[in-house]
């Protein structure tokens, strides 16, 4: 998909489809007014007949409008101008791309960036358009034996700005948006691959390949022997039941000051989660290949940071293993000593993500990080609490939590903070070890974060539970690439 920036009059644009907005009630945007003028009120006459009033979700495709050079003109309903907010703008872009898909046009010119979204400039509007368009056009066909049906698809779209002085900010928006969508695509591709392909070994190979394509990234892969020497027994306890060897993958990007403290991203990489001995129900178990979406998000974020050449030091740590019920698998009631020296009674082997993360978080201390953010499809309780819209956020450092929340609001990849109070810690008490790995049904997302907090006392740390946002279910099931955008926006904000 190609994106470009241009300025100029709408009637002079030679294109397969020209996109302009109509606001409610029956009001022409500046670009639509210009077309109406050169066409001798052609649009006004159609609007007066009631073909389109400007309500959100409306659209009208017109052909060969007098006085224009475009093959088609697509009118898009944008609602009431005073009510046009960020959410409505995103909906408008999404609706437009869906409508373009039905026209058969391969290239288009859009004047939608001229819409007045309160508090948002051309950069925000154009970057949003790039990201939304790319995500809607994403297809995962890696394992299809037949090519896609012969059909025309949108391949190029030009975003219009009002004057030449706005071109530079538009070009920057396209560049940033493309880098972010590349990271999202990488995350989605990794997560959508089946577990018999996307193993811990595969993730390690993908990391090394990423370093070849982006030389600013350095990769280190630790095998199980190295993990044993580090006494990462919590991570290794999850890997006991599978024939696939576990891996700890580190991706280092050093774009900041030589001795600058890094931002560390820790990703949960359970490439398939059967639940172990505490085996999951069979229904929808195929979706447990998505239990490595936290790792995929770290891949995507690091790749984006390197492509954008942000002046930061960022390190990604990925703990990767399967969770299977083999003959050597961890049993409920088994006790392990983590890398930190704390002991854990495993009451439920399906609460394995926190076991691999706790060792990875302890490992992150050696990098003397400024902040550490872990990303994990950790708890079904988060889906119950927040649904599919918001990522769960818990943190021991209020400034970090606030920055992540603000970044999410700015880019549309939102999070919602839950409490991390000491009141919940008691639920993790164990009569036999320092802690249990589960705290019962109540407040499952919070107690999972409480468990991790016991391994982050030396860190400024935040936890992102993406169980509800990392993938969608049903006929159109697949990975979403979240929260790559949130992470990258946070990192971009750190550069200001």
Image (cartoon, rainbow, N blue to C red):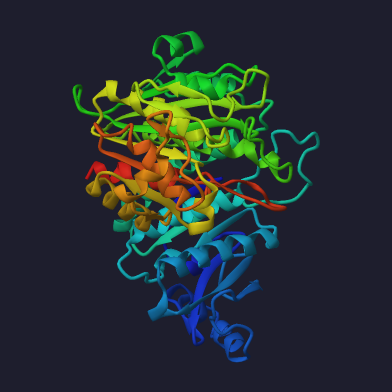
The location of residue 229, given as percent across then percent down, is 41, 9
The quadrant holding residue 310 is: top left
Q: Quadrant of the C terminus?
A: top left
Say left or right for 67 vs 139: left
| Image coords of residue 144 (percent x, y) | 76, 36
Q: Is residue 224 above or below residue 167?
A: above
Q: Which residue is situated farthest in the bottom direction here?
A: 48
- Which residue is outermost to the front? 431
Relative vertical location of residue 103 with respect to residue 42 in this rendering, above or below: above
Seen in the image, is 433 located left or right of residue 468? left
What residue is shown at x 45% (from left), y 19% (from top)? 233
- Identify the residue at image location x=50%, y=34%: 353
Quadrant where the N terminus lies? Answer: top right
> Could you say where residue 363 lies in the image, as x and y percent from the top left?
35, 22
Left or right: 364 as drawn, with respect to 47: left
Q: Position of residue 378 (x, y in %)?
A: 50, 41
Q: Residue 14: tell me if it is visible.
A: yes
Is 234 on the left-hand or right-hand side of 60? left
Residue at (53, 34) in percent of width and height: 347
> Is residue 439 shown above or below 40?
above
Of the pair 319 and 184, the residue shown nearer to us: 319
């Amino acid at each position: 998909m190609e994106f470009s920036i241009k300025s100029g009059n709408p009637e002079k644009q030679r294109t397969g489809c020209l996109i302009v907005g109509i606001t409610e009630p029956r009001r022409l945007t500046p670009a639509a007014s210009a077309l109406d003028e050169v066409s001798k009120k052609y649009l006004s006459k159609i609007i007066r007949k009631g073909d389109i009033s400007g309500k959100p979700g409306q659209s009208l495709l017109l052909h060969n409008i007098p006085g224009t050079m475009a093959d088609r003109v697509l009118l898009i309903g944008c609602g009431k101008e005073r009510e046009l907010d960020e959410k409505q703008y995103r909906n408008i872009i999404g609706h437009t791309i869906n409508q373009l898909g039905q026209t058969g046009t391969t290239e288009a010119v859009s004047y939608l960036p001229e819409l007045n979204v309160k508090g948002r400039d051309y950069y925000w509007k154009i970057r949003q358009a790039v990201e939304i368009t790319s995500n809607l056009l994403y297809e995962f066909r890696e394992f299809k034996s037949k090519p896609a049906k012969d059909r025309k698809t949108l391949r190029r779209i030009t975003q219009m700005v009002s004057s030449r002085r706005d071109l530079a900010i538009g070009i920057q928006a396209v560049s940033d948006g493309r880098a972010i969508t590349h990271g999202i695509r990488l995350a989605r591709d990794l997560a959508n691959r089946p577990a018999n392909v996307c193993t811990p070994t595969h993730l390690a190979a993908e990391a090394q390949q990423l370093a070849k394509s982006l030389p600013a990234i350095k990769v280190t892969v630790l095998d199980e022997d190295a993990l044993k020497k580090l006494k990462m027994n919590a991570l290794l306890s999850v890997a006991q039941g599978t024939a696939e060897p576990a891996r700890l993958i580190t991706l280092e990007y050093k774009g900041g000051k030589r001795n600058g403290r890094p931002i560390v991203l820790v990703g949960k990489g359970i490439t398939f989660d059967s639940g172990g001995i505490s085996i999951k129900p069979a229904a929808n178990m195929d979706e447990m290949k998505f239990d490595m979406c936290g790792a995929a998000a770290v891949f995507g974020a690091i790749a984006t940071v390197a492509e954008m050449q942000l002046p930061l030091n960022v390190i990604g740590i990925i703990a990767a293993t399967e969770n299977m019920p083999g003959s050597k698998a961890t049993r409920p009631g088994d006790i392990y000593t983590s890398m930190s020296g704390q002991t854990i009674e495993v009451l439920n082997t399906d609460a394995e993500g926190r076991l691999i993360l706790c060792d990875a978080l302890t490992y992150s201390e050696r990098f003397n990080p400024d902040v550490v953010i872990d990303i994990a499809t950790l708890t079904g309780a988060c889906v119950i609490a927040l649904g599919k819209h918001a990522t769960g956020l818990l943190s021991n450092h209020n400034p970090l939590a606030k920055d992540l929340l603000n970044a999410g609001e700015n880019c549309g990849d939102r999070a919602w903070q839950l409490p991390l109070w000491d009141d919940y810690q008691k639920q993790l008490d164990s009569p036999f070890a320092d802690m249990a790995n589960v705290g019962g049904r109540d407040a499952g997302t919070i107690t999972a974060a409480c468990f991790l907090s016991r391994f982050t006392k030396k860190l400024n740390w935040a936890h992102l539970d993406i169980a509800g946002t990392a993938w969608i279910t049903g006929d159109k099931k697949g990975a979403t690439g979240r929260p790559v955008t949130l992470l990258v926006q946070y990192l971009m904000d750190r550069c200001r």
